[in-house]
Amino acid sequence: MRQDQRAPFVEALQRARVSAYAPGEFVGQESFMRASEILDLGRRAGLAPGVRALDLCCGVAGPGRYLTRELGCDYLGVDYSASALEIARSLSRDLPCRFEEMRIPPLPLGSFEVVLLLETILAFEDKAGLLAEVAGVLQPGGRFAFTLEEGVALSAGERETMPDADTVWLTPLAEIEELLSIAGMRLVWSEDCSRSHLGVVEALLAAFSGDGEIALQIGEQALAELLAAHRLWRDWLASGRIRKFMLLAEKR
């Protein structure tokens, strides 16, 4: 489901997303993370007032805005979608958030104490190159906080069933650890969140299926692809084919 006109999708899915999460757990994220997980990862990364943070592939920046509001930081969110950033800017209001439109890599020039990459690393086939870029903008001792869809690469048959399969590049955890080390970072903390994300996927699938207005707003084909992808994530998480992790790495 490809689109750069993000507003119709955000509006169409908003009601279902709010209903799918437990109270207080939806903060505008376009992912399976719960707000409590986002906040925990942000705290472990050391986000605080004055800390320079770079949020890669921020989209409409629900997590970024939430972390800035709750923990404070000097926040820069980057994304390739101009329409997503337009929404992010409109919702930031008085928060000290900045946004920049760009495809990554390369990463923005500058030095940061924290780099965030939430629910998006699977879209990068060249993870070695990406991690080298992340290490390049981190200060010594800086933290890279990210999530990982963990597993062996999709088979040819699996790629045929997954919408936008060219953005789904799974990686085993041991390989990520090795690539982090090569890039000059070390893994300092991890948590398996597969079970909680499976619950969110199941709730989102039910909410999207039960909302008759969604197809009217985004079209039958887009809704069909959305549901197909969520069914695959549900099945893969339930079977253990894929595991979800929150990870924190530190630059040496």
Image (tube, rainbow, N blue to C red):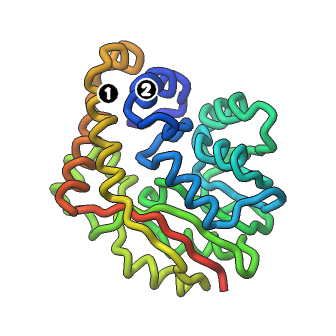
Please report contact status of discs 2 and 1: CB closer than 8 Å, yes or no.
yes
Residue 169 visible, this orientation? no
* Image quadrant containing the C terminus: bottom right
**Image location (x, y in percent) of residue 5:** 54, 28
Q: Residue at x 64, y 30 (%)?
A: 87
Q: Is residue 158 left or right of residue 132?
A: left
Residue nearer the viewer, 180 or 205: 205
Residue type, mark 2 in image: Leu
Q: Is residue 125 left or right of residue 181?
A: left
* Image quadrant containing the N terminus: top left
Distance CA(mark 2)–CA(mark 1): 7 Å
Direction front: furthest residue: 23
Q: Which mark is residue 119?
A: none
Q: Which residue is mark 1?
A: 208
Q: Earlier in the sequence, mark 2 or mark 1?
A: 2
**Image location (x, y in percent) of residue 242:** 27, 62
Q: Residue at x 65, y 80 (%)?
A: 251
Q: Residue at x 69, y 44 (%)?
A: 101
Mark 1 residue crowding within 10 angstroms, few (<14) / some (14–19) / many (20+)? many
Residue type, mark 1 in image: Phe
**Image location (x, y in percent) of residue 115:** 65, 63
Against 224, residue 165 (above or below) is below
Q: Residue at x 41, y 64 (%)?
A: 245
Against 179, residue 207 (above or below) is above
Q: Which residue is mark 2?
A: 13
